[in-house]
Amino acid sequence: MQHKSKNISALFFQRAAEQPDVLAIRDGAETRTYGAFAAEVKATAAYFTELGIQKNDRVLVFVPMGLDLYRVVMALFQIGATAVFLDEWVGLDRLRLCCKLADCKAFIAPWKFRWIGFFIPEIRKIHIKPRLRVDLSKQTEALADCGEDDTALITFTTGSTGTPKAARRTHAFLGHQFRVLAAKMASKPGTVVMTTLPIVLLINFGTGASSVVARFSPKKAQRLKADIILKEMAANQVHTLIASPYFVQKLAESATDHPVPSLQKVFTGGGPVFPPEAALFQHAFPSAAIQVVYGSTEAEPIAGVSVEQLLDKSDLVKRGGLCVGVPDAQIQLEIIEIIKAIVTGRELETIRLPQGSIGEIIVAGDHVLKSYYKNDVAFARNKIIDHQEVIWHRTGDAGFVGADGLLYLCGRCDQMIFRNGCWISPFIWESVFAQSGLVARGTILEWKGQLVAVIQAKPGTAKVSEENLMAVMPEPVDRIIWLEKLPLDPRHHTKIDYEGLKKQMEVLK
């Protein structure tokens, strides 16, 4: 088969031709070799073409992570259509909003979601609704000639601070991201990788690695069965684990009783890893090289740090920053003043900060997202075009570059508190409370003119005294408030959802 472009689809088919009998993906009891999976992808692409789905058509994909999801996405890539991807944790309101934003030609989902779609106006008006099962006897060898600026994938930001942004990932962007992440992961044909991160599994198809889909639903994160997953990892001789800190922590808590001798690498990202978690990971997986990756929907990766280096820099957390490591070699990084307003390229020259100063982290590079789908407002708020026409992405994260050249994270800019001429970081207070061992988690807010510590007690334990809490705090607070549970982000269950927390606080007296 002749490939007209080296996009993810072309790389996958190349791997399938080179290693047809190598395991491509395992999803529970179901497995597919590269050869068998490529045949299913071609059959699915033929079916989509028969239905009238063409190059550049947007197709809403609401399928749980697994064999069906990747067969569908790879088939859409093959015909040059755009996969509009929704996480399975999304609620009805978000589903309707994303439908409205993406304006899709087709909707692909399991039958129960297709049935529910009859009652959702935004989905009901989508006329093409392909079934998941297809006739494998009909296949197409054609591979769309996609240009670098053609859109391959549209994903949505978490949207915890407002309307979710539709991140437009072009074939060129995915190619650049593939090269950076593939180099970092260093996977190769035959490497067995378990991941909970959808984009990473796409990268595996390009490297020829074998993917094991974890039995984990972000929508039902509390039901995670760590012992079952660890046994599955051992049975499949998993070499590399790539998952959120929440997922890795749950496995680490059970790893002593269920070791995975084959595990050699762990990559975790999507939320902060504080020193106590880093120490737990190191103890649980002593034979594995463990790295924490810092990034976002729009720029992944930005930086990375080993757990050894993170622990070595743990004393700096109380002084204002969590070490996230060396900025990636393929990325440009600057620190600018924390400004809520839109920043122009002309202003950029005057608000850059020197080394050691806390400000907003901005990044630029080939694997940094250049645009959003039909959202000029989001572009203006989150991008800066400098005098050389370089597009910088405003991460919305506060941090600084230390004298050691490492990047330190201080939390979200819109959560930072400015008092007495200094920045106070709720994110750092999260770390302080975590390291204290006194509570499950805690943070700090400026609420009704007061500096307030918000605390969640450890399960099954009594509240510790305010005197003991005050002793570990970086500075005194006006009030301590106990909540039964602090809300966490829906995607990774790692970061405190501050918008949700503020809503909880509104009902308090």
Image (cartoon, rainbow, N blue to C red):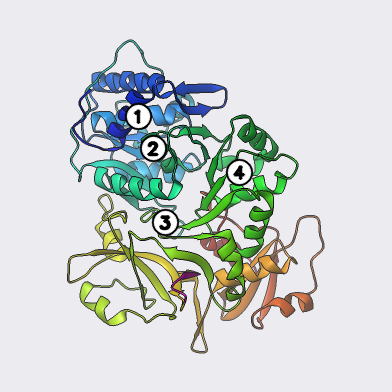
- Amino acid on which disc 2 is placed: Thr
406 drawn magenta: yes
Badge number at residue 15: 1
Q: Earlier in the sequence, mark 2 or mark 1?
A: 1
- Vertical side of 250 occupied by 229: above or below: above
Q: Earlier in the sequence, mark 2 or mark 4?
A: 2
Contact check, label 3 and label 4, Cβ < 8 Å: no
Badge number at residue 296: 3
Residue 202: x percent and y percent?
Answer: 39, 38
- Amino acid on which disc 4 is placed: Ala
Q: Which of label 1 and label 3 is nearer to you? A: 1
Circle 4: is it few (<14), some (14-19), or many (20+) Cα within 10 Å?
A: some
Q: Residue at x 21, y 77 (%)?
A: 346
- Amino acid on which disc 1 is placed: Arg
Residue 330: x percent and y percent?
Answer: 33, 59
Q: Secondary structure at mark 4?
A: helix
Q: Secondary structure at mark 1?
A: helix
Q: Earlier in the sequence, mark 1 or mark 3?
A: 1
The quarter of the displayed image where residue 455 is located: bottom right
Contact check, label 2 and label 1, Cβ < 8 Å: yes
| Residue matched to label 2 | 207
| Residue matched to label 4 | 221
